Image (cartoon, rainbow, N blue to C red):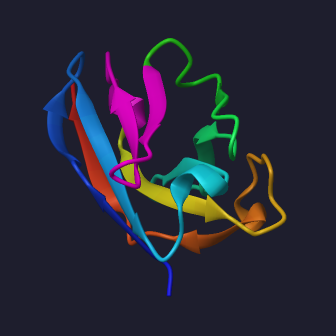
Amino acid sequence: QVQLVESGGGLVQAGGSLRLSCAASGLTVSSYAMAWFRQAPGKEREFVAAIIRSAGSTTYADSGKGRFTISRDNAKNTVYLQMNSLKPGDTAVYYCAAGRSDTYYSTVPSAFGSWGQGTQVTVSS
């Protein structure tokens, strides 16, 4: 059974940093496309960043380019999202997701079959 457990969220002032972690069990993160999405109140879930299976290449939504970094630690079977220069507009619940078995790369939620419970990130102005 696949489990993705996020941690690292919290309250931070604008300009601050947070590092989110996604500890995986039941799958090997290097063998799956892994991604972070976020959902703010009243809004649809949106793509934040992804790391491509095997190759490890990364891609980002425009909103996070230059500020966010997705990475993985294969030894710890964990995916991270380092977020710097945070803005109030980054406030949302952040979700870790693992791609379906046939997903090599995607930025759409429907391509991801396993999700964590989410971690709240609140950025104050």
* Residue 86 lies in the magenta-colored region: yes
Give the answer, above or below, for where 105 lies relative to 42. above
| Image coordinates for residue 59, horizontal then vertical, percent | 67, 29
Residue at 41% x, 32% y is 89
- Is there any visible trace of residue 88 in the rendered image? yes
* Residue 6 lies in the magenta-colored region: no
| Image coordinates for residue 105, horizontal then vertical, percent | 78, 46
Whether residue 96 sits left or right of residue 15 in the image: it is right
Q: Residue furthest top?
A: 66
Residue at 48% x, 33% y is 70
Q: Residue furthest bottom?
A: 1
Whether residue 114 sits left or right of residue 6 in the image: it is right
Residue at 31% x, 44% y is 20
| Image coordinates for residue 96, horizontal then vertical, percent | 48, 57
Q: Quadrant of the C terminus?
A: top left
* Range covered by the magenta-colored residues: 68-90
Whether residue 32 sits left or right of residue 63 in the image: it is right
Q: Residue furthest right?
A: 102
- Is there any visible trace of residue 42 in the rendered image? no
**Closer-to-camera residue (33/15):** 33
Give the answer, above or below, for where 116 lies relative to 50. below
Whether residue 82 sits left or right of residue 114 in the image: it is left
Give the answer, above or below, for where 22 lies relative to 52. below
Q: Residue 116, located in which quarter of the rendered image?
A: bottom left
| Image coordinates for residue 7, horizontal then vertical, percent | 25, 56
Give the answer, above or below, for where 23 lies relative to 114. above
